[in-house]
Amino acid sequence: MIFCNLAVVKINLRPSERQEHRIPNLRKALAVSCHLLGLFKNILNLFSSSEKSQTLSQPGEESKKKFDLEYNDLGKFKYEDDDFIFQFDKEPQKIKWADVERLVAYKADLMTIDEIRMDIVYNNWRTTITEDTPGWFQFILKTKSVFKSIPNDWDVKIIQPAFATNLTVLYEREDRIMPTKNNFYASFENINKSKIKVTLENNGWTCRKASFTDFELVNSWTELLLEGDDNSPLLNGMVSFHKKNIASLNIIFSSLGGQYTYEFYDDENLIFEKKNDS
């Protein structure tokens, strides 16, 4: 802090001179004081600005260094030519890029902020990572390099609007492209509903009750509803229409015994039908 000592000089004037000198002298004193105060203010501002610039620049540089480290960090990921290794909590796991069935990005509303997340579906399993997962940035870059159909700017566009989920399917393998509405309808005779449920569960489907008598069965390429009577069950929903999936359905349904019929539709048109009368 700078202190200023102002000296006060007392001038003795004759009575006749006091009146005419009072105002000019006062004006001179005020002018000098204002000039000195202005000078001191400029000096103080100079020091203050210098300190502020140093204070502001240091956190900015530190933040940039921290971000650069996070951006280039491989984190929980290791990369090889045809696969990547992800460090789960218990142990690492190697995942082939060819086994990746689907990548889905979305935002989670955490009340005060949004969190970008990605579901990685592979071999009928799903793993979720977030933007706080160590190695997130490099993994995003790697997926864009491996899967050319992924938009380069998806991670920017998904930010707006705030607190919206913005669910985005970034990638689907050819045999995992899902329809937007029901396209599969199957009926069974002389096959118990519980046998269908157990058989699908044993082949990787996840099951949960949809009602007292019906079940939802889901895997990476189907979303099915098992309903109807116990001895004449119905199975319908969304199925990725691909020759590999049709072959899998034929093997599973044939193992049940009895009769079955199923159909695939494209919009309103029948595109495939299979009947087994054994």
Image (cartoon, helix red, strand yellow):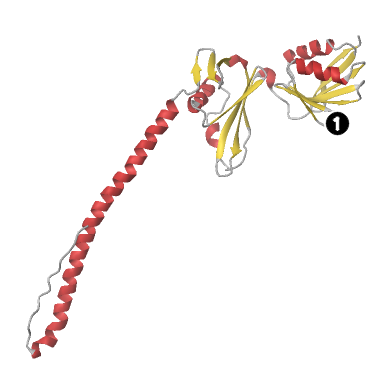
Percent position (x, y) of residue 41? 23, 60
Q: Residue 13's image quarter?
A: bottom left
Q: Is residue 256 visible?
A: yes
Horizontally, residue 249 falls left or right of residue 54, namely right
* Picture quarter with the N terminus: bottom left
Percent position (x, y) of residue 2? 20, 59
Amino acid bearing label 1: Phe
Q: Is residue 42 above or below residue 240?
A: below
Horizontally, residue 268 falls left or right of residue 125, namely right
Q: Residue 163's image quarter?
A: top right
Q: Residue at x 14, y 87 (%)?
A: 19
Percent position (x, y) of residue 264? 81, 21
Horizontally, residue 219 falls left or right of residue 156, namely right
- The outermost residue toward the front is 90
Q: Which residue was labeled with disc 1?
A: 212
Name the element at disc 1: loop
Q: Is residue 158 visible?
A: no
Q: Residue at x 84, y 20 (%)?
A: 263
Is the residue marked by circle 1 packed among few (<14), some (14-19), or many (20+) residues within 10 Å?
few
Horizontally, residue 1 falls left or right of residue 15, namely right
- The outermost residue toward the bottom is 16
Percent position (x, y) of residue 11? 8, 80
* Picture quarter with the C terminus: top right
Q: Residue at x 69, y 17 (%)?
A: 175
